[in-house]
Image (cartoon, rainbow, N blue to C red):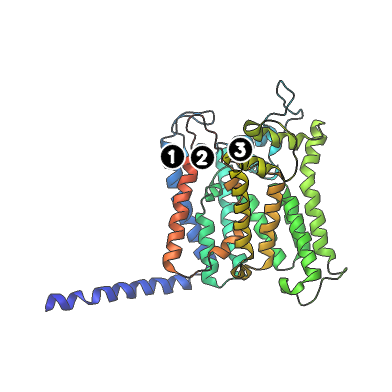
Amino acid sequence: MTTASTAVPRPRASRAALTWVVVRWRLVPWWLRITVVYTLSRVLTTVMMSGFARIQAANSFTVQNPTYLSFASIWDGAWYRVIAASGYPSTLPVDAAGHATENAWAFMPAYPFTVRALMALTGASFEFVAVWVSLLSGWGAALVFRRLMGRFLDPTRATFATVLFCVAPVSVVFQVAYAEAMGVLLLLVALLLLVQRRFWAMLPVVLLLGMTRPTGLAFALLMVLFVLVGVLRPAWLRMPERLTPRTAVAPATVAVVSGLVGLAWPAVAWAVTGVPRAYTDTELAWRSSYIGWGELVPFTPWVQGFGWWFHQPAGAILLVAVLLGFAAVVFQPAARSIGLELRLWGVAYLVYLLAVFFPQSSTWRILLPIAPLLGVVALPRSRVYRVALVVLAVVLQWTWLYFCWWVDGYDWTPP
C-alpha cells in the first residue's frame, strides 16, 4: 500500500511542473522568448555545421577539417570575400567563346560593403565579420518576423510561425557569409511598414533592400498590386475607403522607387564594364553548365529547368502541379488569416522568380523571402502537428547541409 500510494502523485507533480514552466515562459517578454528560440536554433545548426566541417575534405574553398568560420564562408561567401577585398571588375571576364564567366557582378553590394566597413573599423577577418553580420541580421529578422505575424495571428500562432522561421531547412543562411539574412531582415521591415501603412518610411528600406538582394522588381510588383486592390477592393486590405489619386501617391512612389532600384544594379554593371548586358550575362553564366548559352527570355527558365531536371512532359506536368500547389496555399480561405499584403508578396515574388530565375539547387535558399507564408503553416494548434513540423524542419536542415553546403568531391549542388 505504501509503495502504491507514493507512486501515484508523481505524474501529477510532473504535470504541475510542466504547467508552471509553461506559465512562467508565457510571462517572459515576447522579444526575449524569440531571442531564446533563435539562439537555441542557431546552436543546433552550429552543431550540425561543425559535424560536417570535421569530415570536410580539402577543396577549392577550404583546407581539410576547416574551422567553423572558414566552413561558413564557402560558396557565395568566397565571392563576397572578393568584393569586400577588391570590389567589382571593371572589365567583364569572358571565356574563349566570348561568353561572360562567373564573376562578382552577380552579387549586390550592400552586404559585402557593410562587411568591408566593419572589417576596417574592427580589424577583424572577413569570415568573422561576415558570419556575425548574418547572425545578428537573422536575429533582427526573427524579431521583426514575430512582430509581423503578430499583426495577424494570435500570440501563440505568431510565436510558432517564428519558431518555424528559425529552424527552417535553409535557416543555415542566418549564420554563414551570405547576404540572405540581411536581405530578409530588410524585406520583413519593409513588409511590416507596409502593413502599418508607413509608406514614406519604406523608401530608405526599399533602396537598401534592392542593393542587398535582387528583389526590387518583385517588391515593385507587390506595391502595384497593393495600389490596384486599394483602388478596386479596399476592404480586402482592411482599408476604410478606396485609394484616391492623392492617397495613392505614397504607395505608388514606393513602387516606382523599388522598380528603379531593381534596374539600378544592371545599369551600374553596364556603366562600369561598358557591356550593356553585363549583369544578365553574368547570371546566365551560372546556368550555362546546365542548359548551355542562350538569351534570357522571360518566363522560360522554369520550363527549361524542369525540363532539364525531369525531362518532358514530366517536367511540365510537375511545374504545373507546383504552381497549383502554391496557389492552393496562398488562396485557401485559411490563408486570409495572414492578410492580403503578405499573400500578394508571395505571388509577386513567385512571378519574379518565374520570369528570371533558373531552378537548381539554390532554389530552396532563393525561396526564403516567402517565409511570411509560414503564418499559414502555423495555423493548426495540434501539439503533435507542431512537434512533427519542427522535427521535419531540422531533418531537412541536415539534408540541405548534406546535399548543398558540404563539398563532396565534384559538387554540382551549390547552395
Nearer the observer: mark 3 or 2; the answer is: 3
Confirm or deny contact between disc 3 and disc 1 (CB under 8 A). Answer: no
- In terms of sequence position, does the residue under pointer 3 or pointer 2 come before the other? 3
Percent position of residue 360, x then y: 60, 41
Location of residue 300 by image quarter: top right
Farthest residue to the front: give it. 313
Confirm or deny contact between disc 2 and disc 1 (CB under 8 A). Answer: yes
Confirm or deny contact between disc 3 and disc 2 (CB under 8 A). Answer: no
- In terms of sequence position, does the residue under pointer 2 or pointer 1 come before the other? 1
**How far apart in space, not on screen, are marks 2 and 1 (Cα)?**
9 Å
Q: Secondary structure at mark 2?
A: helix
Which residue is denoted by mark 1 in the rendering? 52
Q: Residues within 10 Å of mark 1 (few under 14, many from 20)?
A: many
Q: Residues within 10 Å of mark 3 (few under 14, many from 20)?
A: some
397 to the left or right of 278? left
Label 2 sits on what residue type?
Trp
Which residue is denoted by mark 3 in the rendering? 308
Nearer the observer: mark 3 or 1; the answer is: 3
Label 1 sits on what residue type?
Phe
Which residue is denoted by mark 2 in the rendering? 405
Q: Residues within 10 Å of mark 2 (few under 14, many from 20)?
A: many
Location of residue 80 by image quarter: top right
Label 3 sits on what residue type?
Trp
